[in-house]
Amino acid sequence: MASPAPGSSSRASDERGGSGLVPLEEHRAAILRAVRPLPAREVAAVDALGLVLAEPVASRLDLPSFTNSAMDGYAVVAADLAELPASLPVRGDIRAGATGEQRMAAGECWRIMTGAPVPAGADAIVPVELTDGGTTQVQVREQVEPGNAVRHQGEDLRVGDPLVPAGSLLLAHHLSAIVAAGVETVQAVPRPRLAVLTTGDELVPPGQPLAPGQIVDSNGPMLRALALCADVEVVAVEHVRDDDDLGAVVDRLAESADAVVTSGGVSAGAYEPVKDAYAGGDAVRFVSVAMQPGKPQGFGLVGGRGVPLFALPGNPVSSLVSFQEFVLPALRKLAGRSPKLPVLHARVVDGWRSPAGRLQLARVRLARRDGELQVSASGGAGSHILGGLASAQAIAYVPAEQTRVEPGEVLAVRMLPGEIVPDE
């Protein structure tokens, strides 16, 4: 039997018997209620790849904009080919891009190239393959019907015809049609601008020597990469120490960003700079979510513009799964997209333990055998374990009431950003 949808557990109690843990789905729903799509703006059509269209686009041209040839050959009057072979004088060549209007009468023809305007008086194109290819006189070996290989003006679109509806995620084929239809700009929801802020005196930028008690700041690069995978613009990646004025830094970042993500400083102990910065106020709400890893979470609207602040735990795996479960859906909503992410189902190969009372987000590897997607654990369950994270491809969701994952059962899984579902 397949597990329920990710995060759909009821309100849980923690493993010590205490209450008050918030289900993952409830915390995510509260975030999404607070987030609104960014205001649409005018964007050059050629720069709108990956944006969501805010207003429908209609054609500003007839397509084709003129009657033209669908292939290389000869523009003719089809009735002139009643008796074969037919020999016709060639008045000249019409190339693609020719702008002068050409005319012809019965009993003659023009040699014409694909995409070139059909001369007035012609009603068909004879493919060059059905002729001897003559340049001054051509012999036609087969008949064609009127309209053969002729693309008539407006047969695809007329001026004002609907082209792409509002709400469409603009992809390459949309842009081709939009630009071809004479549309230069569109109204679209812009990409969200994200600022990333890591916290803690123990963190050292990548490439710098480590003193005893220090670790490399891997969350900054990871969160930046996750945002880029989500087609989000990253406007800043910064680090604050425990005694810095974190609130002031967040407010500064919120002036140019549409969302701010912090990592670390949200646990229950001392020296928690994110919690300390917003203690005593109601701008940011800190909760314990019934998930493992990623229990401590915070969210609120900050700065003068009410920018979403996502306060994530500092352990790398916790930050990653929290980004996927809370930040990514909200960024998608900011961008005008659906916040829902695709869910797959996979059968367990080797079982593992799961914590009581919390939805487990397990790092897993996937394989496809005999047409079925299969899942196995990737490393230990600790939120600090990066070796297993490096080999993981997806997150598997183990319901909060379940303490053991057994071989053969089916779990809901989501691919990690950038990972591809394996083939057979």
Image (cartoon, rainbow, N blue to C red):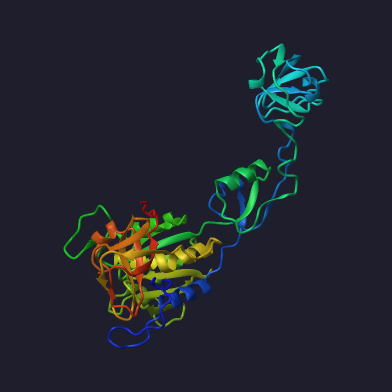
Left or right side of 354 for 274? right
Q: Position of residue 68 (x, y in %)?
A: 72, 31
Q: Is residue 262 above or below residue 227?
A: below
Q: Nearer the viewer, residue 307 or 7?
A: 7
Q: Is residue 424 above or below residue 311?
A: above
Left or right side of 262 for 177? right
Residue sitting farthest toward the left? 212
Q: Nearer the viewer, residue 136 or 77?
A: 77
Q: Position of residue 184 (x, y in %)?
A: 65, 45
Q: Position of residue 344 (x, y in %)?
A: 41, 63
Could you say which quadrant of the image residue 94 lies in? top right
Q: Nearer the viewer, residue 39 or 112?
A: 112
Residue sitting farthest toward the front? 83
Q: Is residue 118 above or below residue 414?
A: above
Could you say which quadrant of the image residue 271 lies in? bottom left
Q: Position of residue 255 (x, y in %)?
A: 49, 63
Residue 254 seen in this snapshot:
no
Could you say which quadrant of the image residue 143 lies in? top right
Q: Nearer the viewer, residue 143 or 178?
A: 143
Residue at image location 71% in from the left, 11% down from the top: 136
Q: Quadrant of the N terminus?
A: bottom left
Residue 72 seen in this snapshot:
yes
Q: Is residue 292 above or below residue 93?
A: below
